[in-house]
Amino acid sequence: ETGVTQTPRHLVMGMTNKKSLKCEQHLGHNAMYWYKQSAKKPLELMFVYNFKEQTENNSVPSRFSPECPNSSHLFLHLHTLQPEDSALYLCASSQDANNEQFFGPGTRLTVL
Amino acid sequence: GQNIDQPTEMTATEGAIVQINCTYQTSGFNGLFWYQQHAGEAPTFLSYNVLDGLEEKGRFSSFLSRSKGYSYLLLKELQMKDSASYLCAVRGAGNNRKLIWGLGTSLAVNP
Protein backbone atom coordinates (compact mmCIF):
# COMPACT_ATOMS: atom_id res chain seq x y z
CA GLU A 1 0.00 0.00 0.00
CA THR A 2 1.69 3.16 -1.19
CA GLY A 3 -0.86 5.66 0.08
CA VAL A 4 -1.70 6.77 -3.46
CA THR A 5 -4.78 5.28 -5.07
CA GLN A 6 -5.98 5.53 -8.64
CA THR A 7 -9.28 4.65 -10.28
CA PRO A 8 -10.13 3.04 -12.53
CA ARG A 9 -7.29 0.54 -12.83
CA HIS A 10 -8.26 -0.30 -16.40
CA LEU A 11 -10.15 1.78 -18.96
CA VAL A 12 -11.12 1.11 -22.55
CA MET A 13 -12.60 4.02 -24.44
CA GLY A 14 -13.47 5.06 -27.95
CA MET A 15 -11.98 8.07 -29.62
CA THR A 16 -15.18 10.08 -29.13
CA ASN A 17 -15.69 9.25 -25.46
CA LYS A 18 -15.10 11.50 -22.46
CA LYS A 19 -13.72 9.92 -19.32
CA SER A 20 -11.82 10.94 -16.20
CA LEU A 21 -9.02 9.37 -14.22
CA LYS A 22 -8.94 9.92 -10.48
CA CYS A 23 -6.02 9.98 -8.09
CA GLU A 24 -6.12 10.36 -4.31
CA GLN A 25 -3.18 10.54 -1.92
CA HIS A 26 -3.43 9.85 1.79
CA LEU A 27 0.11 10.94 2.67
CA GLY A 28 -0.44 14.62 3.44
CA HIS A 29 1.74 15.65 0.50
CA ASN A 30 1.41 19.00 -1.24
CA ALA A 31 2.66 18.14 -4.74
CA MET A 32 0.95 15.82 -7.23
CA TYR A 33 1.93 14.62 -10.69
CA TRP A 34 0.54 12.92 -13.76
CA TYR A 35 2.89 10.71 -15.81
CA LYS A 36 2.42 8.71 -18.98
CA GLN A 37 4.28 5.40 -19.28
CA SER A 38 4.43 3.78 -22.72
CA ALA A 39 6.28 0.68 -23.80
CA LYS A 40 9.91 1.31 -24.74
CA LYS A 41 9.71 4.96 -23.65
CA PRO A 42 10.82 6.63 -20.43
CA LEU A 43 8.27 8.00 -18.02
CA GLU A 44 6.85 11.23 -19.44
CA LEU A 45 5.88 13.95 -17.00
CA MET A 46 2.58 15.50 -18.04
CA PHE A 47 1.47 17.86 -15.27
CA VAL A 48 2.66 19.01 -11.86
CA TYR A 49 0.54 20.61 -9.16
CA ASN A 50 2.12 22.23 -6.12
CA PHE A 51 -0.27 23.42 -3.40
CA LYS A 52 -3.13 22.94 -5.90
CA GLU A 53 -1.49 25.28 -8.42
CA GLN A 54 -0.37 23.90 -11.75
CA THR A 55 3.36 24.53 -11.97
CA GLU A 56 4.16 22.48 -15.05
CA ASN A 57 2.40 21.56 -18.25
CA ASN A 58 4.85 19.56 -20.26
CA SER A 59 3.50 20.40 -23.74
CA VAL A 60 0.59 18.04 -23.29
CA PRO A 61 -2.17 18.08 -25.95
CA SER A 62 -5.35 19.84 -24.89
CA ARG A 63 -7.32 16.59 -25.13
CA PHE A 64 -5.82 15.93 -21.66
CA SER A 65 -7.17 18.31 -19.03
CA PRO A 66 -5.99 18.12 -15.41
CA GLU A 67 -7.92 19.26 -12.36
CA CYS A 68 -6.69 19.55 -8.78
CA PRO A 69 -9.54 20.59 -6.46
CA ASN A 70 -7.43 20.14 -3.31
CA SER A 71 -4.01 18.86 -2.33
CA SER A 72 -5.29 15.28 -1.90
CA HIS A 73 -7.12 14.80 -5.18
CA LEU A 74 -6.05 14.97 -8.80
CA PHE A 75 -8.06 14.26 -11.92
CA LEU A 76 -7.17 13.81 -15.56
CA HIS A 77 -10.08 14.50 -17.89
CA LEU A 78 -9.87 12.81 -21.26
CA HIS A 79 -11.72 13.65 -24.46
CA THR A 80 -11.32 12.80 -28.15
CA LEU A 81 -8.21 10.73 -27.49
CA GLN A 82 -6.14 9.01 -30.14
CA PRO A 83 -5.00 5.36 -30.22
CA GLU A 84 -1.42 6.49 -29.53
CA ASP A 85 -2.64 7.80 -26.17
CA SER A 86 -3.01 4.20 -25.01
CA ALA A 87 -0.58 3.81 -22.12
CA LEU A 88 -0.26 3.43 -18.37
CA TYR A 89 -1.11 6.71 -16.63
CA LEU A 90 0.58 7.07 -13.29
CA CYS A 91 -0.20 9.53 -10.54
CA ALA A 92 2.42 10.43 -7.94
CA SER A 93 2.72 12.71 -4.93
CA SER A 94 5.56 14.15 -2.90
CA GLN A 95 6.14 16.40 0.07
CA ASP A 96 7.33 19.47 -1.79
CA ALA A 97 8.42 19.21 -5.39
CA ASN A 98 11.99 18.19 -4.58
CA ASN A 99 11.46 15.05 -2.54
CA GLU A 100 10.97 11.44 -3.60
CA GLN A 101 7.71 10.72 -5.32
CA PHE A 102 5.23 8.06 -4.27
CA PHE A 103 3.35 6.48 -7.14
CA GLY A 104 -0.12 5.07 -7.47
CA PRO A 105 -0.75 1.73 -9.24
CA GLY A 106 -1.72 3.45 -12.47
CA THR A 107 -4.61 3.31 -14.90
CA ARG A 108 -4.07 1.13 -17.96
CA LEU A 109 -5.81 3.07 -20.76
CA THR A 110 -6.69 1.62 -24.13
CA VAL A 111 -8.09 3.90 -26.83
CA LEU A 112 -9.85 2.10 -29.65
CA GLY B 1 19.99 17.62 -24.86
CA GLN B 2 19.17 15.63 -21.78
CA ASN B 3 19.78 11.91 -21.72
CA ILE B 4 19.71 9.03 -19.27
CA ASP B 5 21.27 5.70 -20.33
CA GLN B 6 20.79 2.34 -18.66
CA PRO B 7 21.11 -1.22 -19.97
CA THR B 8 17.82 -2.55 -21.27
CA GLU B 9 18.00 -6.00 -19.72
CA MET B 10 20.13 -7.90 -17.24
CA THR B 11 20.06 -11.44 -15.92
CA ALA B 12 21.48 -12.69 -12.65
CA THR B 13 21.31 -15.71 -10.38
CA GLU B 14 19.61 -15.96 -7.02
CA GLY B 15 22.05 -15.20 -4.21
CA ALA B 16 24.46 -13.31 -6.47
CA ILE B 17 25.32 -9.60 -6.72
CA VAL B 18 24.31 -7.42 -9.65
CA GLN B 19 25.26 -3.85 -10.56
CA ILE B 20 22.95 -1.74 -12.71
CA ASN B 21 24.64 1.29 -14.26
CA CYS B 22 23.15 4.64 -15.17
CA THR B 23 24.89 7.46 -17.03
CA TYR B 24 23.35 10.85 -17.49
CA GLN B 25 23.77 14.10 -19.38
CA THR B 26 21.46 16.78 -18.05
CA SER B 27 21.30 20.56 -17.89
CA GLY B 28 22.17 20.88 -14.24
CA PHE B 29 22.02 18.28 -11.48
CA ASN B 30 20.12 18.25 -8.24
CA GLY B 31 19.99 14.58 -7.28
CA LEU B 32 19.59 11.10 -8.71
CA PHE B 33 16.85 8.63 -7.80
CA TRP B 34 16.49 4.88 -8.23
CA TYR B 35 13.05 3.30 -8.36
CA GLN B 36 11.92 -0.32 -8.61
CA GLN B 37 8.90 -1.25 -10.69
CA HIS B 38 7.43 -4.74 -10.75
CA ALA B 39 5.39 -5.64 -13.81
CA GLY B 40 1.94 -4.09 -13.63
CA GLU B 41 2.72 -2.20 -10.43
CA ALA B 42 3.68 1.31 -9.36
CA PRO B 43 7.33 2.41 -9.21
CA THR B 44 8.59 2.43 -5.63
CA PHE B 45 11.40 4.61 -4.32
CA LEU B 46 14.70 2.85 -3.57
CA SER B 47 17.40 5.48 -3.09
CA TYR B 48 18.48 9.08 -3.54
CA ASN B 49 22.01 10.41 -4.12
CA VAL B 50 22.95 14.06 -4.35
CA LEU B 51 26.56 13.92 -3.14
CA ASP B 52 29.34 11.69 -4.47
CA GLY B 53 29.77 8.35 -2.80
CA LEU B 54 27.90 5.25 -1.74
CA GLU B 55 24.57 5.13 0.04
CA GLU B 56 23.77 1.77 1.61
CA LYS B 57 20.31 0.59 2.53
CA GLY B 58 20.10 -3.08 3.42
CA ARG B 59 20.72 -5.29 0.40
CA PHE B 60 20.61 -2.28 -1.93
CA SER B 61 23.33 0.35 -2.36
CA SER B 62 23.56 3.28 -4.75
CA PHE B 63 26.69 5.10 -5.87
CA LEU B 64 27.10 8.49 -7.50
CA SER B 65 29.95 10.26 -9.30
CA ARG B 66 28.83 13.71 -10.38
CA SER B 67 32.04 14.45 -12.27
CA LYS B 68 31.49 11.35 -14.41
CA GLY B 69 27.73 11.68 -14.71
CA TYR B 70 27.47 8.13 -13.44
CA SER B 71 25.56 6.12 -10.90
CA TYR B 72 25.02 2.48 -10.16
CA LEU B 73 22.57 0.46 -8.11
CA LEU B 74 24.07 -2.57 -6.39
CA LEU B 75 21.81 -5.42 -5.36
CA LYS B 76 23.28 -8.06 -3.05
CA GLU B 77 22.02 -11.51 -2.07
CA LEU B 78 19.58 -11.47 -4.95
CA GLN B 79 16.14 -12.92 -4.42
CA MET B 80 13.56 -13.99 -6.96
CA LYS B 81 11.35 -11.08 -5.89
CA ASP B 82 14.06 -8.67 -7.09
CA SER B 83 13.03 -9.47 -10.66
CA ALA B 84 11.70 -6.08 -11.77
CA SER B 85 12.50 -2.99 -13.79
CA TYR B 86 14.92 -0.52 -12.17
CA LEU B 87 14.47 3.11 -13.16
CA CYS B 88 17.12 5.80 -12.89
CA ALA B 89 15.92 9.41 -12.73
CA VAL B 90 17.86 12.68 -12.48
CA ARG B 91 16.53 15.99 -11.19
CA GLY B 92 17.66 19.06 -13.02
CA ALA B 93 18.66 22.29 -11.34
CA GLY B 94 17.67 25.93 -11.46
CA ASN B 95 14.41 26.55 -13.29
CA ASN B 96 14.27 22.99 -14.60
CA ARG B 97 13.94 20.78 -11.55
CA LYS B 98 11.69 18.12 -13.02
CA LEU B 99 12.82 14.49 -13.06
CA ILE B 100 14.32 13.10 -16.26
CA TRP B 101 13.77 9.35 -16.43
CA GLY B 102 15.72 6.54 -18.01
CA LEU B 103 14.00 3.71 -19.88
CA GLY B 104 14.65 1.32 -17.02
CA THR B 105 16.64 -1.89 -16.73
CA SER B 106 14.64 -5.11 -16.68
CA LEU B 107 16.34 -7.50 -14.25
CA ALA B 108 15.54 -11.21 -14.33
CA VAL B 109 16.70 -13.24 -11.33
CA ASN B 110 16.96 -16.94 -12.08
CA PRO B 111 17.10 -19.79 -9.55
Image (tube, coloured by chain):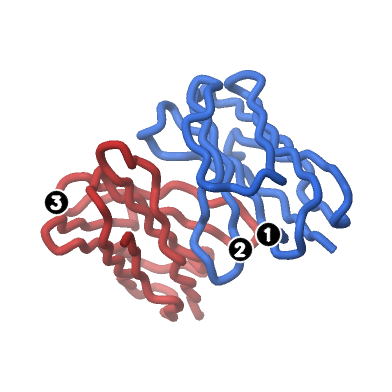
Mark 2 or mark 1, earlier in chain:
2
Question: How dense is the environment of label 3, judged by Cα within 10 Å: few (below 14), some, or many (20 and up)?
Answer: few
**Secondary element at tag 2:** loop
Q: Is residue A57 left or right of residue B15?
A: right
Q: Is residue A29 left or right of residue A105?
A: left
Q: As rendered, which of A58 and A39 lies closer to the eye?
A: A58
**Do residues under tags 2 and 1 come within 8 Å of each other at their CB atoms?**
yes
Q: Is residue B44 left or right of residue B20?
A: right
**Secondary element at tag 1:** strand
| Colour chain A is painted in | blue
Please state the chain letter of the residue tagged with numbered disc 2 in the rendered image.
Answer: A
Which circle marks residue B93 in the picture?
none
**Do residues under tags 2 and 3 come within 8 Å of each other at their CB atoms?**
no
Residue type at the position of mark 2 = Ser
Residue under label 1, please give it.
Answer: A87
Residue at (61%, 23%) from the top-left corner? Answer: A72
Indicate the quadrant containing the N terminus of chain A: top left, top right, bottom left or bottom right. top right
Residue at (58%, 21%) from the top-left corner? Answer: A71
Residue type at the position of mark 3 = Asp
Residue A64 in which image quadrant: top right
| Colour chain B is painted in | red
Residue under label 3, please give it.
Answer: B52
The location of residue A36, given as percent across then percent down, is 60, 53
The location of residue A43, given as percent across then percent down, is 51, 56
Residue under label 2, please give it.
Answer: A38
